[in-house]
Image (cartoon, grey):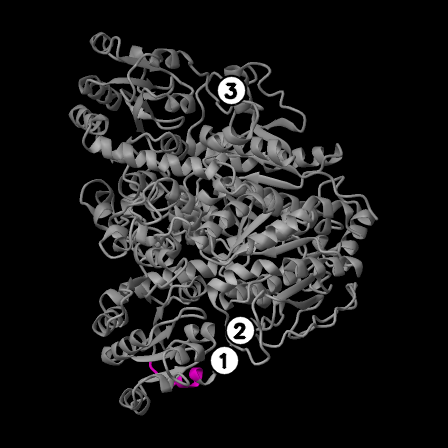
Amino acid sequence: MSSPPPPAHAVFFPFPVQGHVSMALHLAKLLHARGGVRVTFVHSERNRRRVLRSRGGAALDGAPGFRFAAIPDGLPLSENDDGDAPPPGMVPLLVAIRSVVPHFRRVLDDLAAAGEPPTCVVTDMDHILVAATDMGLPTVLSWAPSPCNLLASLHYQQLIDRGLIPLKGMANLLSNGYMESTVVDWVEGMPADTRLRDFGSFVRTADADDAVLSMYVSYVECLRGTPSAVVLNTFDALEPEVVAALSRLLLPRPVYTVGPLPQLALARVDGAVVGASLWPEDGGCLEWLRGRPPRSVLYVNFGSIVVVTREQLVELAWGLARSGHDFVWVIRDDQAKGGGCNPIGMFPPEFAEEIKGRGYVTSWCPQEALLRHEAIGAFFTHCGWNSMLDGICNGIPMLCYPIAADQQTNCRYARTEWRIGVEVDENIERGHVDRMVREVMGDVKGKEMRRRAMGLKEKADMAVAPGGTSWINLENLINEALIAFLINMWVVVVTHRHAPAGVRRGDEGARLCNELVSSGGVVSARGHQGIFDTLTQHGCIYPRARVELVERERDRHLPCRRRRRQPPPTRCSSRTRRKATSRRRCTWPASSTRGAASTSPSSTPSATTASPSAPVAPPRSPAPPASAFAAVPDGLPLSDDDDGPPDNVELFFSIGSSVPHLRKILDDAAASGTPATCVVTDIDQVLLAASDMGLPAVAFWTTSACGLMALMQCKHLIERGIIPLKDAEQLSNGYLDSTVVDWVPGMPSDMRLRDFISFVRTTDPNDAVLDVVVSAMENLRTATSAVILNTFDELEGDVLAALSRIIPSPIYTVGPLPQLAAATAAASDVDASDAASLWPEDDACLEWLRTKPPRSVLYVNFGSIVHLTKQQLVELALGLAESGHDFLWVIRDDQAKIAGGVDPVDTFPPEFREKIIKGKVGYLTSWCPQEAALRHEAIGAFLTHCGWNSMLDSISNGVPMVCCPMDADQQTNCRYARTEWRVGVEIDDAIERKEVARMVREVMGEAEGKEMRQRAMEWKERAAMAVAPCGTSWLNIERLVNEVLSPHKKDMVESS
């Protein structure tokens, strides 16, 4: 066995201006402190001198595993320049910095020669990305501006192609309204009313040969194709549509949102390696703020680059003075064009007298600390992205004065999307400044903006808190990118002639490559067995089959499966990686065989190792390789001819009796030499039993995340006296609708009691079901090693973030599982079929659908558990007939029997059957392949009970819904479909034929129905993104395997 590879070593080289350096340094500190990553941080020589001047001689000493280096920036720098000179202009620096590649290569070579070879390069400069790639190194793009600006920038070439830029004349820029009136409504992920003026400043040119525009377009195109991963300084809840669109545009590169970086660093880094400021900071402003009333002071800062005219500064100064509000104003020494070396000295004496005692003017300050101060009430900003995030993270509304680069785009989002700011006219005038300051600092519009800003602050805090999206994404970046880069690099650069000196360790690297390939990848180098326990109810079985399939296929690959740009000479292709068979074993105890398809165990093949020259085809069989099925009693009587589902409540209480039988399965597995390493279940008694046996217990929750959150509130609803209901009248007197539950984290503030799970609808203070739910939720919090949810991050982001704070164990979102299984199987060229259905399926309905026009058929299915009365069935039937639309209706045999029929068709009067069958407008069946039906182009809407599997099937296929919730989490799911995702309407639970007909016409129609279909298709696209290679659910399966089933670092060392 060869020795393990050296630690990951990231070399950072950001564009050498303050905002880019700050972001990169925060990220570097985080990776070093929390991921054990070695860091070399490269400054420009000019910035090195500025840091030493501003922060002292020890500022660049670094720390163990964290060092600094410096290279020229391409512009002249005298030997006696100590960093006191003004920084260079942006355009000269943009041009000059491209000449530093040889110096940067030398840094990499020196590190390799010293025995610490770099394993990746983190930068935001295209020429550095290309140079590192040419040297065989993986690269990470750390994008310092806003993601909305990146998305806009990726469409600059299309703006040129469509003739929108360059401008036809400067009049278009200056006066005739062209920038305002030109709407760019075709950029996916950006608002449909985005104007040309909302794009970055590079579009404001009339020169067809504009060098800066050409350079920027080329730069952005390089970013699209070169880096191995992309890091954004934002959080998912701030720009979800933008991040989703970028994730699609940048595929197959993964996109990691890890912001706000300063706040994440505060949450995760104990102490600081070094400060990020290139300017000497005046801490006296914080002393001046002490004693000022809360929210009484305006903070003014135009950042580290923006330069304004002396006239603009004077107008701004008098506008601030007239506003009557106290202010802290940062004016850099180099900021004013046309003279002035001292900030306060550039104004007339009467200004200093006017602001005496209420204005503090300085050349630089510790901005993050200042914005955290309670005295700050608003932020007058140039809308640089770091400043915007600092304002957002502290709940501060803004006066926006965008000047250049991405600032116009950021201003647009602050004004119209987040509604936390106002825009100051670019022709700055003192009266206008006075009015805007009063508006934002005031108690009318200002109060509303502060409220919204505080809402964003809370979301930012959630993102960086343990279990928040940015917290988790940082872990993903380390585990999926940096460590995976390390393994891939050892495979790739074994003989690559451009590798830095000292990296080419041919024999050792070749041995490692052979071991990785022949063992089937790091995570499959050791055998693992998962025990999957399951309820007999249909809704809880079929997602589990998908988890097993996806994990089985995940096990066939190296830790990082995503495609990336690699040097061609020596690499392990994805085809080579697939040659090893899986070693994971999965056992499926099914509780009895009630209503189930055949579950005869498959033979378990011995682990097989494949060499690169002898590929082994993956077997295709009903039961996957190295898996087996088993059965245990469910505690209910079972006759030989019993083929129907059990009573739900009876099963709810009896299933606990299966624990001794499951223990026997575990004991038998251990005795046979294949001991279980974890148990996956949604039964709390089984969770406890597994924990008692010392086994990791993974809770696989088959309801929605919002349904789980609603369940977890039952205890609080009881404690607050909201449930049990005082009497049965509260079920019908409006109490459920009028009782607002506005205190649940991650859920809308207008949630009603009726939107919660059906178990709250009881008047019994000793309700046994409610007691079991409360107990089960506590066990879920305390007895699990991990929680798996069949959802995707973008669908239920706020709820997931809140759950991550409530549940101590990690949460893995891996849905929609049917689509993820299909995507994984497609990537692995294997059979994705499974035997998840407990009901015989009628495939003929698909043939019937082929005769129907697109979006013309309503699909109706109330799932595998819900029972309707005969009256409800008849009303529903007559409503469907009255709607005038074709329909495919699933009525289970047991449902038909309860309604007095022998089969679905026999349930209804002869005249109804004749009308729908002879008229060929309806197809009734006892069960059908639902996923295939909903994928069919003929389906226009889904009338559903809102069971979670059905909801996800509909969302994943872009099908709007008619919701008729009955039980369990269905009310909560319906609420989200109606008001949060806006893809459905709700039928009253009384089910009356005229309302059914009206709702069906509405959803199948061309008015509201068209809008719902459009939104449903957008959710379909987002679901497809989540399960695509490098999507959130795809990567979360990787995390689940690496972090729970086979810890990544342990296997990397111990694989054999």
For disc 2, the neighbor class at 10 Å (few under 14, some 14 to 19, many from 20) is some
What is the C-alpha distance between the residues marked 2 and 1? Answer: 8 Å
Q: Name the residue under label 2.
A: 837
What is the C-alpha distance between the residues marked 2 and 3? Answer: 67 Å
| Residue 195 located left or right of residue 1053 | left
Q: Mark 1 points at which residue?
A: 841
- Label 3: which secondary element: helix
The amino acid type found where label 3 is placed reads Arg
The amino acid type found where label 1 is placed reads Glu
Up the image or down, 528 lies above or below 480; here it is below
Q: Nearer the viewer, mark 3 or mark 1?
A: 1
Q: Mark 3 points at which residue?
A: 50
The amino acid type found where label 2 is placed reads Ser
Disc 2 vs disc 1: Cβ atoms closer than 8 Å?
Answer: yes
- Range of the magenta residues? 845-853
Q: Quadrant of residue 671?
A: bottom right
| Residue 13 located left or right of residue 353 | right
